[in-house]
Image (cartoon, helix red, strand yellow):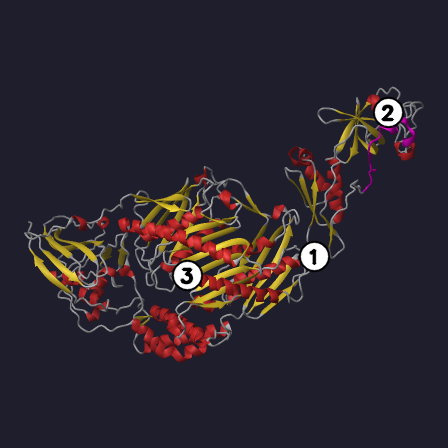
Amino acid sequence: MHMNPTFLSINLRNVCLLKSKEIREQGARDKKVKMIRSNYIMHESNASSVSVSLQLQFAICKCRGPTTTDKTQNSITIIPPSLSSVIEMLATTSFHGGPSSHFAHSTVTRHHKPYFRVTKPHSVLSICAFLSSRRTTSNRFTITALNRDTDSSVSPEKEAKPFFPQFHTVKIPVGDRYITVETGQIGRQASGSVIVRDGETIVYTSVCMSDVPSEPSDFFPMSVHYQERFSAAGRTSGGFFKREGRTKDHEVLICRLIDRPLRPTMLKGFYHETQILSWVLSYDGLHSPDSLAVTAAGIAVALSEVPNTNTVAGVRIGLIGDKFIVNPTTAEMEDSKLDLMLAGSETGILMIEGYCDFLPEEKLLQAIEVGQDAVRAICKEVDNLVKKCGKPKMLDSIKLPPPELYKHVEEIAGDELVRALQIKNKVPRRKALSLLEEKVLNILTEEGYVSKSETAVGAEITPDMLEDEDEEEEFVVDGEFDEGDVHIKPVLKKPVPTFYSEVDVKLVFKSVSSKYLRKRIVKGGKRSDSRTSEDIRPIDAECGLLPRAHGSALFTRGETQALAVVTLGDKQMAQRIDNLVGVEDVKRFYLQYTFPPSCVGEAGRIGAPSRREIGHGTLAERALEPVLPSEDDFPYTIRVESTITESNGSSSMASVCGGCLALQDAGVPLKSSIAGIAMGLVVDTEEFGGDGKPLILSDITGSEDASGDMDFKVAGNDDGVTAFQMDIKVSGITLSTMEQALLQAKEGRKRILAEMLKCSPPPSKKLSKHAPLILVMKVKPEKVNVIIGSGGKKVKSIIEETGVESIETQDNGIVKITSRDLASLEKTKVIISNLTMVPVVGDIYRNCKITSVVPFGVFVEIVPGREGLCHVSELSPEYLSRPDDVFKVGDIIDVKLIEINEKGQLRLSRKALLPDQGTDKPNENQRTPQKHTDKGKPRQSSNTSKGDADKTPDVTFMKRYIGSRKNEPKTSSNKSDTVASTDDGSALVNGEAPVG
């Protein structure tokens, strides 16, 4: 049975929603059940529009058999008692924002289609009670009944948008080239997805959010994951499982680059967990994917339903000569004096991070201005794209604490809050604020304003508040219909009280505390520790407090303290990083930052470094890197550990100061000292009685960081900046504000550097006696393989013989020997020098040992590691049939080099050094076989002196004399070695050994 549908139009003030409703009647088995299905489609309209069209179509049909609910339609199943209750329910704005806690389950899909499942408990018997619990008004609407014959057709422009978005592409000029943005082809089920191309580098980013809002908090629930796929560069992971593993450190840094500019743009009160996923799908080795990932994430959020204030984009700025380059290539970055990552919107700067080589503040500001112009151009094009295919924002899902709660909290805590914020020390102030928060919560609970069991704003509906016509009726459970007529008659028996949630009270208390702290700073001119806006906290520094460490320093600034430790080593201690291009990146210097929970007086998780620890460590590392000596001047690998033992703001900059002192204590010849400082900001000074100009704070504490609008870290010396990083909590800051912060930071760095000079005890500035010694030699490149030997056997034998820690060889002929003592270092140097020498025909070698005897001659070791053959015909002037008749292994003889064949093999002669007449005397140290006569025996080499040799005719062929072999070999080098003395009298040899 069918009947003509009925249409109604509802005009609702201040709500911009186009709602298409379909209500139909179905048979549940043999009985009729009423069912309403709702599909919501957001309708874009301007701010002045106050009307919304709601169309309800009713149809009646009769069905037999079990009834099922199609969950793919994103529908809701509610059993209305009458048409009037349906209209009242659908016209209530709070109903569209989300269900009450009385519903067992709710989801909000990417098209903002609520889906509710109603359960049996009596708390859901009344729709009117549900509407009352949301504490919203629904009296601003009118209802008009229309017939089927009237114009009830929906205009084409108001038809429902397709489930999958349409494909769009746009080219955006960035610097001297274009980037391509595509959406609607890949990732169509995500709330927002985009592909950004630069050359052949492609980054794909998607944005999704949870259906159910999470617990309200002052922290926006957003997570960012960035990954560089090895397949993007045509490679495969080298691991056993052949797939990407845990997030690498540089990927973590890019995750932070994406997160930090987006977070200030998110609207408060939106608690749906948001996840941003970004993958590098293709990498050409020329165009860096990090700036593309920031821009792609900003575009994806702008296209999604996540409510935010501004479109975000990011660029990299390089400086080659005096020219600033937007998004430079990797080849251009090798010559750049600046590496600046900037993200912002059309209205202001949201984030900067960069590293440079003592760049003046004026140049840095010029680079920021160039970057801001590029970002503004990108955002303009993205906004046009959003107008074409962007999804409506879920503004009605924003839940803020009620305004009257702020008034209640200020009335209760006002005076005590002022006194608590005047406590100078962090721990007592934190305890006082915690006790005051508990007091406010208890008072509001006693007065009946707070229900601890309710987390959302609204009253709890209990069964005794409601009544129903038939208590034995069955109700909807998980979208299925039970037998029997389903009928709900909403009737309230008593009024519902109003409650605030405990979470709202805590959020409001934190907001009020932040407001009072800002007011004290702006209006009173004093911070919590009684400093002015430009004052620096007291500084204390101490070096050499760890006797076995190679270098150590303890840096304390106020209630922030960092313990920095330096460890020196060879290349084996370097940090190796796998990347997309396939070339292993080896870091000679790295700083590792640790922030244990004990530094803030708490107990917490201890494990792998957090993203914050990785980010802070990298910032401090790059701040110190420009002052390090080159590897040629200081061949050590340098590791700095910075452990935060106390924290009250600016711990990363304390790591910079402490790390600089520890490096000096370890004997690292730094070019200059480096200091770091964190700057804060209060933007809305006029609200608190100021002049309206932004107030810059030097050396901020933890509470000023949390309550302020900016955290701007700057490191460098008097000449310029080496590293910087800025995060903000407002929608953007201007270039003039940043200029003021940079200039004020420069003055702060000067004061800190002056205090670091007062360090007591001062850094030793010499190598520790516990540090390893490294000797650097230069040999001919073609001789490197001689040192290594077949399969590395030769170099391993040298290490075993001399006791050194390692021998490192390079293709260019550089050899580095690492040892704990000078004796083994010198011994290895002699072996390698003799091993790699270039012999010359005519050279004479004395006191050489016979290593083996063969039928055709003997092999003689002329220098350690080098052997030559002395043929049987060259052993004696007289005929000798068998060499072993006269010689044995271990005998000492003198030989002369008479030939080097094409394979580099040496031919030696003993006969050339003997007189033409006479016979040789037997060697007294040799055991001569009894069967043999004295005839033909070799002359005793140990009795042959240098003077005797000079008397022979062979002396005319002597070109070079190689020193005698002793227990401790000596080198023939005529160059003096550069020696760095240590505490125990040993020396670091860092000279160059001669070849040969």
Nearer mark to the viewer, of 3 and 2: 3
In the picture, measured across the screen, residue 484 lies left or right of residue 564, that is left
Residue 105: give x, y in percent of width and height: 27, 58
- State the extent of the magenta-drawn residues as a range: 949-967
Q: Spatial distance from mark 1 to mark 3, Cα to Cα? A: 46 Å
Q: Spatial distance from mark 1 to mark 2, Cα to Cα? A: 55 Å
Q: Secondary structure at mark 1?
A: loop
Which amino acid type corresponds to the residue marked 1 in the rendered image? Lys
Task: Identify the residue shown where x is 88% and y is 22%.
Answer: 877
In the picture, measured across the screen, residue 542 lies left or right of residue 224, that is right
Which amino acid type corresponds to the residue marked 3 in the rendered image? Thr
Quadrant of residue 887 in the image? top right
Pointers 1 and 3 in contact (C-beta within 8 Å): no
* Residue at which label 3 appears: 734
Task: Identify the residue shown where x is 82% and y is 38%.
Answer: 965
* Residue at which label 1 appears: 766
Q: Secondary structure at mark 3?
A: loop
Q: Is residue 105 magenta?
A: no
Q: Toward the viewer: 154 or 862?
A: 154
Near mark 2 (Cα within 10 A), the count class, few <14, some 14-19 or many ≥20, is many
Which amino acid type corresponds to the residue marked 2 in the rendered image? Lys
Q: Secondary structure at mark 2?
A: helix
Residue 484: give x, y in percent of width and height: 13, 57
Near mark 3 (Cα within 10 A), the count class, few <14, some 14-19 or many ≥20, is few
* Residue at which label 2 appears: 911
